[in-house]
Image (cartoon, rainbow, N blue to C red):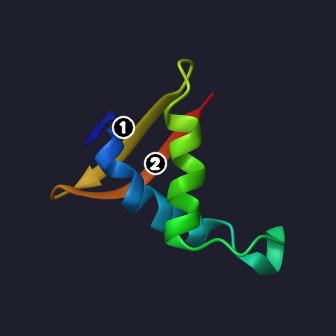
Amino acid sequence: MIRKMKEEDLQQCGVIYAKAFPIEYWGIDWNPDNAKEYLLDYYEQKRFVGYVYEEDDVVIGCIFIL
């Protein structure tokens, strides 16, 4: 199911983000915590638009723009 992102989704989105952008390719040592903080900065912007994909109430994908 696709739905609009909520702030409580950011922890799992941080996990996904850290896996999607490993240091070997992007040069930044992402981990779930610093990725969540990074995403929170975006989430708090008025122009932020984000969606999550979940199965069985577990977020397994996310997309966002600013």
Q: Position of residue 20 (x, y in %)?
A: 61, 66
Name the residue rendered at 81%, 68% in the picture.
Answer: 26
Apparent side of residue 38 relative to residue 32 in the rendered image (left or right) = right
Say above or below: 4 vs 55: above
Secondary structure at badge 2 equals strand
Look at the image and tell me in which quarter the C terminus lies.
Answer: top right
Q: Residues within 10 Å of mark 2 (few under 14, many from 20)?
A: many
N-term mark: 1 or 2: 1
Image location (x, y in percent) of residue 43? 50, 36
Residue drawn at the location 68% of the way across and 67% of the way down: 21
Q: Nearer the viewer, residue 61 or 11?
A: 11
Can you name the residue that lies furthest to the bottom here? 24
Residue 39 locus on image (x, y percent):
55, 48
Judge the density around disc 1: few (<14), some (14-19), many (≥20) Cα neighbours within 10 Å.
many
Q: How far from the left and from the top, in percent, is residue 46?
A: 53, 18
Which of the 4 image quarters holds residue 7?
Answer: top left
Say which residue appears at 36% left-offset and 37% top-offset: 5
Q: Amino acid at mark 2?
A: Cys
Q: Secondary structure at mark 1?
A: loop
Q: Which residue is mark 2?
A: 62
Could you tell whether 48 is left or right of 3 in the image?
A: right
Q: Quadrant of residue 11?
A: bottom left
Is residue 49 shown above or below 18? above
Q: Is residue 32 above or below residue 3?
A: below
Cβ atoms at labels 1 and 2 below 8 Å apart: yes
* Residue kind at label 1, given as amino acid type: Met
- In this view, 26 is above or below 36: below
How far apart in space, not on screen, are marks 1 and 2 (Cα)?
8 Å
- Per the image, the residue denoted by label 1 is 5
Q: Quadrant of the N terminus?
A: top left
